[in-house]
Image (cartoon, grey):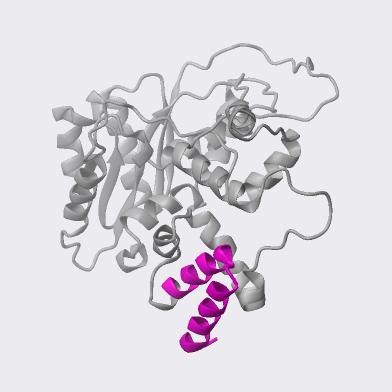
Amino acid sequence: MSEDQLDSAINEAQKADETRLVRRLCFIKNLYFGDATKVAAQRVGVSRHTGDRWLAGWNEASVGGLRPSFAGGRPAKLSPEQFEEFFTLLEEGQPWTPQEIDDLLWDRYGVTYDRAHLARILRADGMQYAKPRPMDPRQSPDAEADFRERLEEALAKDNGEKPLVLGFFDACWPQPFENSQRMWSYDRTVEIDKPLVTVPWKTLGFYAILGKRTLIFRKQTTKESICAALEAIREQNPIGRILLIADNDGGHHAKFTQQRADELGIEFVFLPPFSPEFNAIEPLWKTLKRKISPEIFEGEDHFEQFVTDTFLDISKRLGFANSWIEKLIPDVQMLR
């Protein structure tokens, strides 16, 4: 549809007093002007998820795909105007627990919905049911900008003809009795017999965006064990400058560690304080622990081999770092 045809459709919808359709067509016109979906949606006062849904309807059936349809079936408990207000309140006050949404519906509109049906309504408007990501209140409001500047400065250095190795470095302490994966059963009290025995060593991992991943085990995360991990990373990546994104553990900042890193051609890019969300290895550790949950291990050697194989397998995926890459280095291919 041309821009003139779109303007005509907007005028016709205004004459017919189809206010909901006018709003959606104005969203489409914002896209015609070159707005990104998120910006176009913000201009008409809706979330990006709602904008995505409207765009899908437009692509499928043009104006018809945007026109609301409430015909047939039992009359809705809320009018279209009430639904618009309801979704606006949800967006302004997010996140919500299911009980809080139930209370809002009853207190404001005097209606109730079956939880399953309510979930369908909320998902249709672009809401998602997920655990909120915890944020440390001590984090600086400028944390992302500071980290972006630090990262850009490190990436701007000349590597010559040699490749750049880039990834996330961190320590974790997975145990054979991890219990972080939900499993289907008919008995909610079902049990898995797993010896509650701890392993005496911690796991130091390098999750590479560019380069080869590495994993070693040490009983303590001392500066000596960190240096051993740096040596393992260099062994796996013998050529090029290595950038390690890491937290502010004292062992990382230790003079002994920094000297050894310099000798190995490794540079740390430290995260802002209280900002673990900038370390893309964190979701990888969570996935590793979920993989451990249903397994039974014959001994420490079996467990160590399982952790090694699993880490090396799942760290092939860049999915853990996708949002990080999009936000901070969208041109990562230029670095290869």
Asked if residue 195 shows in the view, the reply is yes
Asked if residue 238 shows in the view, the reply is no
Residue at x-position 58% and y-position 27%: 100
Please name whichever residue, 19 or 185, is drawn nearer the observer in this view of the structure: 19
**Extreme residue in the top direction:** 196
Instruction: Give coordinates of residue 200: x percent, y percent.
Output: 47, 16
Residue at x-position 19% and y-position 52%: 154
Please name whichever residue, 125 or 286, is drawn nearer the observer in this view of the structure: 125
Quarter of the view holding residue 45: bottom left
In the image, is residue 177 above or below residue 3?
above
**Residue 168 magenta:** no
**In the image, 67: left or right of 133?**
right
Q: In which quarter of the image is the C terminus?
A: bottom left
In the image, is residue 146 above or below residue 216?
below
**In the image, 202: left or right of 131?**
left
**Residue 12 magenta:** yes
Residue at x-position 79% and y-position 17%: 190
How many labels sit on residues? 0
Residue at x-position 53% and y-position 73%: 14
**In the image, 228: left or right of 121?**
left
Instruction: Give coordinates of residue 68: x percent, y percent.
Output: 66, 63
Instruction: Give coordinates of residue 29: x percent, y percent.
Output: 45, 75
Instruction: Give coordinates of residue 122: x percent, y percent.
Output: 63, 45
Q: In which quarter of the image is the N terminus?
A: bottom right
* Residues rendered magenta in the picture: 1-30
In the image, is residue 23 above or below residue 168?
below
Magenta residues: mostly which secondary structure? Answer: helix
